[in-house]
Amino acid sequence: MHQPSTLSERAAGAPESTTSNGVDHDVPSHASPPVSSVSPVSPVSPLTPAWRRVGADVSGAATAHEALAAAGLDWSVQARPLAIAGSSDRIAGHKAIVRSDTGDVLGVVGSRYQPIQNLEAFAWADRVVGSGGAAFECAGVMGGGKLVWMLLRLAGELRGGSTDDVTRPYVLVVNAHDGSRSLLVLRTAVRLVCSNTLLAVLREAKRRTLALRHTSGSLDRLDEAREVLGLAACEFDRMRLAMTAMAAVRFAEADARGFFAGLLPPREGEGADPLLESLMVAWHDPRQQMPGIAGTLWAAVNAVTQYADWERPARGEGAEREQRRLRSMWLGPGAALKAKAWNAAERLIA
């Protein structure tokens, strides 16, 4: 039987490393605004997911080619030699990756780098979509084409216990043209009530992801991406069981505070920690007060996810800010914080 004091002590222990395939491992910033300046998600706010604000709806596409055309991503990249400005002397060992339709330089890479074209990155999904196991949903770019991504919705849904808290399974595919990362195939899930994303960058991450470096022979391994989808049913069932178990662990406010504190790096100075207080605001949000969810470990996990996806500060303005937020929640500090919260919660139900 779990006791609140024990839960607080265990949650506040040293968290697991969030190092895993595909995540930018920045430490979640403590430079959050005071809780009074954070805008909690209103229960009546229209919750348009960040990927829909950044990307294009491709749900009508039957193939990757159609999805790319619908999103304006049916362009290619070319590798071109580098030369010193004002000279014909080439720079050995490096080349530029250039977007074919605009001529924009997306990145400078090493000589061994092998571009993976947009169609090559996503065409493997055609067979899965054609069989009804998945559907193209949304696609877009970040950084003018430096990163190209596509979200595929898988069949079925996850429901914690007998609650109305529904989460849908997805697969996220990310292809980089700037040399910053491998081609990634990641399992993720979206909680419908708030459009929060739970990235499956958890324990045994290699079973849940595929990462292909842009080198010779990478295209020969793209069929492995279908294996990632093939494992989805049992892996998402495991996730459903974990959600149910988390919803069965009662959490008092002190437990939630201790759980959140265990996720954050040490902070110097006195006074309230603004990031911790922001997480407490998310803990009290109406979306964490649903029947069967309120006052549980599952509510605490979703409070972290809500903060990371909706309320964590992002630099820039307009589209640039939206892209930064999306990258953080999928691949950066936001994703790392969510993975840390999930792993800490899994330890509590082990």
Image: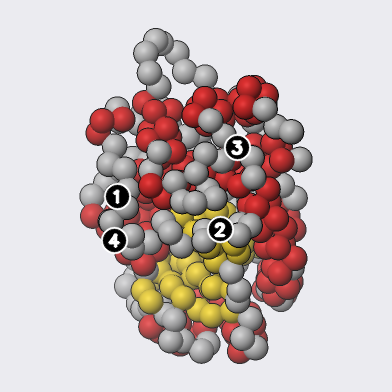
Q: Are marks 3 and 4 in contact (CB under 8 Å)?
A: no
Q: Earlier in the sequence, mark 2 or mark 1?
A: 1
Q: Report how far apart the C-alphas of labels 2 and 3 lie in the structure.
A: 15 Å
Q: Are marks 4 and 2 in contact (CB under 8 Å)?
A: no
Which quadrant, please, contains the N terminus?
top right
- Identify the residue position indicated by label 4 in the image: 46
Question: Does residue 173 sit above or below 60 in this rendering?
Answer: above
* Element on which disc 3 rests: loop
111 left or right of 98 in image: right
Q: Kindly identify which numbered label has been placed on residue 163.
A: 2
Q: Position of residue 55 (x, y in %)?
A: 37, 68
Q: Amino acid at mark 1?
A: Ser
Q: Report how far apart the C-alphas of labels 2 and 1 lie in the structure.
A: 21 Å
Q: Earlier in the sequence, mark 4 or mark 2?
A: 4
Look at discs 2 and 1 and give the one toward the viewer: 2
- Identify the residue position indicated by label 3 in the image: 250
Question: Does residue 93 sit above or below 233 in this rendering?
Answer: above
- Identify the residue position indicated by label 1 in the image: 42
Q: Report how far apart the C-alphas of labels 3 and 4 lie in the structure.
A: 30 Å
* Element on which disc 1 rests: loop
Q: Residue at x 52, y 87 (%)?
A: 63
Q: Report how far apart the C-alphas of labels 1 and 3 lie in the structure.
A: 25 Å
Q: Residue at x 35, y 31 (%)?
A: 32
